[in-house]
Each structure stands twice: as C-alpha cells, then as structure tokens.
Image (cartoon, helix red, strand yellow):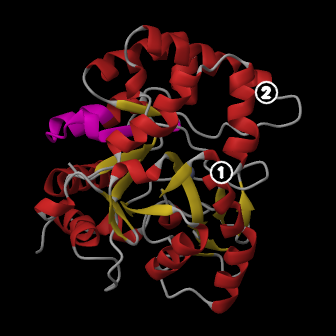
Amino acid sequence: MSAITAGEKGNVMTVNGPVEPGALGRVLMHEHLHCDIFDWGAKKLLSEEKPITAERRAYLMTAAVPYLKPCNEHDCFGFLEVTPAPWRAWPTFYAEAAKAANMHIVLCTGFYRDVEQGTYWVKRPEDSIWPFVREAPVDQLADFCIREITEGVHGTEVRAGAIKLGSSQPEMTEPEKKALRAGARAQKATGVHITTHCTRIGAETAQLELFDKEGVDLSRVAIGHTAPHLMNPESRKTCLEWMKRGANFLPTNMSINEGNGDRWRPLVEAIHDVFDAGYGDHIAGFGLDWAFSSESGPFGPCIGQPPPFLHMYTHTLPAFRKMGLTPEEEEQIMAKSPQRILPVR
Ligand SMILES: [Zn+2]
C-alpha cells in the first residue's frame, strides 16, 4: 500500500492534488455538494457510488456550483466536502466542480453514523448504516480509508484529504465504534484530520475518549455540529477541558432566517468566552451544513437557507459581526484554524 510522501506533508490534499494551506484563504469547513443517501422511489439505501449521470451533473452545475465562485470575493478558496462514502458524487465531478468554481475542494473518506429508527430515511433496521460498516472488520474499514487517501477514490487520481466519522448518541453503537476505530487508525497512518458528526451533548466525550484511546493526536480532530455544545455553559466547560488536551470544535448550521438572528447571540458570546480562556484557536472553523441531499426526500437543496454555501458570507458572518464577533475572532475561525487543521501532518 502506498503512503503519503514527504512532499505532500504540510499541504492540503485537495481533489486536484496537494495545495499549500495559505492558498485556501477562508474555508467552509462542513458542507455537502452531494449527499445522495436514499432512493425514495425504490425505497432503497444507496450503498454504491457510480459515475455521475449527465442529468445530475447538469443539475449541480446550475444549482450548486455557481454559488461557490462568489465566495472568492470574500477571500474564501477552500471547501470541505464532508459527505462520507458511499453517498458522495463520483470523484472526478469534484475535480471538475473545483476548477469551475475556482475553489479548492477537499473530499472526505470515512463512514456515517448509525441513524436512529424513524428519523430521516430510516424505516427498517437494515437502513440505519452502510452494510459495509456493519459487516466488515475494523482493519478492512481502515484499509478502505487509507487507500482512498493515499491512492485515490474508485481508481481515479482523486484522493480524499480528510476522514468523516460520526455517532448519534452519547453511547455509541457497535458499528459506530468500529467505524471510529477504523478512522482513527487511518488518521494515524496518513496524517489527515478527522471531522465528525456530533449533534448530541455528551457524544463529544465518547468520540474523543475513543480517539484518545486509539492514540490519535486530538489536535487532529474537529468535533462537528457543536454550536449547542458551546452555547450551553455546562457543556462548554467540557469542551474547554477537551480543548486543553488539543481537540477542536466546529459549530455548524448557522443559517440566518428572517428574525432568527438573535438565536445565535449565545454562540457569539460563547466564542468570546473560548477566546478569553485562551483557546480560540481550537474553534476549527464554521460550516453551514448546506447540502444537496436526499436525506428527507428526493435529491435536492436541503438544510440551509439560500443562497447555497455563499450564505456564510451574505448572511451568517454579517449577522455575527453585528452581534460583536471581532475581526480577530473571525480571521482565526475562518482562515487560521482551517489552514492549521487541513494540511496533512
Ligand atoms: Zn453535514
């Protein structure tokens, strides 16, 4: 099995090859250009990635990609596609989209969580997690991730540059534990960072304890969807304890609706608190979790408020500035932290 070369260390592994971190400017750290999970017509979990159809390509080139290039006007040249296998677009599509949008796109390998029965698409136990994750031993799952990072995805030259993992509850399921152990081993073998799905308060500790036990340097981990964890004063203390040990936290889903802006005031206050404590550089970045997805119905725009992706610069950051987010905090979160975390170490 091939490995990361010395020349690649210190650079960000994008879909079009290694790039020096400064070229990224600001980065959107948790987005989904393509997350096709479930075939709602056939009522079937998608478990295999296939070359993109002309129809799907044309749709994304019209509905999604045009919103990336204007991000350049806000010094944003980096985009982390956090969709795990097997729900990504075909890898060469990302290479094409990156060129069309003048955006450095980083693709993830890795595995999604065990989704709770009765939520999203999960009506049958067998649809809660990718069968490969349920069935394969840890070593095989780790090898899958390592190959996608060091050799390429689906026989293409497009390589993954990060590892996406996740768990649903503070207590992980057995397949989730296997997936996280495999991802931890792939992290240590390759040096790319781990980004997670962690919506529940308490799940951050389960995830970080597992990574720590596996010997992962916690500064190579961004615990995702953690705006609630930071906004809650009690769980913020837990986050700060983990930050002291190196871990990073990534708030997401900060869409701004008419009149909901105030909802985020406690997050801006929490960010001040983390910076005052001296751990501002452990906020890994911001993400909208904007998605073109089929998680709740046929494939289409999902989760975020318009415009896709660009909303960070047209709505979220302007609202946060009004609430008192300082230029130093913004620069750390949008540029410095991502440029530290994304390169292969
Ligand atoms: Zn997401």
Q: Position of residue 14 (x, y in %)?
A: 38, 64
Q: 87 or 3: nearer the eye?
A: 3
Q: Position of residue 237 (x, y in %)?
A: 42, 12
Identify the secondary structure beneath mark 2: helix
Residue under label 1: 73
Q: Is residue 209 magenta?
A: yes
Which numbered tag is attached to residue 261? Answer: 2
Q: Residue 238 sits in which quadrant?
A: top left
Q: Amino acid at mark 2?
A: Gly
- Relative vertical location of residue 266 with respect to residue 170 in this rendering, above or below: above
Q: 54 or 22: nearer the eye?
A: 22
Q: Earlier in the sequence, mark 1 or mark 2?
A: 1
- For label 1, count other residues whose C-alpha is less than 10 Å away and answer few (under 14), some (14-19) or many (20+): few
Q: Position of residue 313 (x, y in %)?
A: 69, 42
- For label 2, count other residues whose C-alpha is less than 10 Å away and answer few (under 14), some (14-19) or many (20+): some
- Measure the alpha-carbon separation of dots 1 and 2: 23 Å
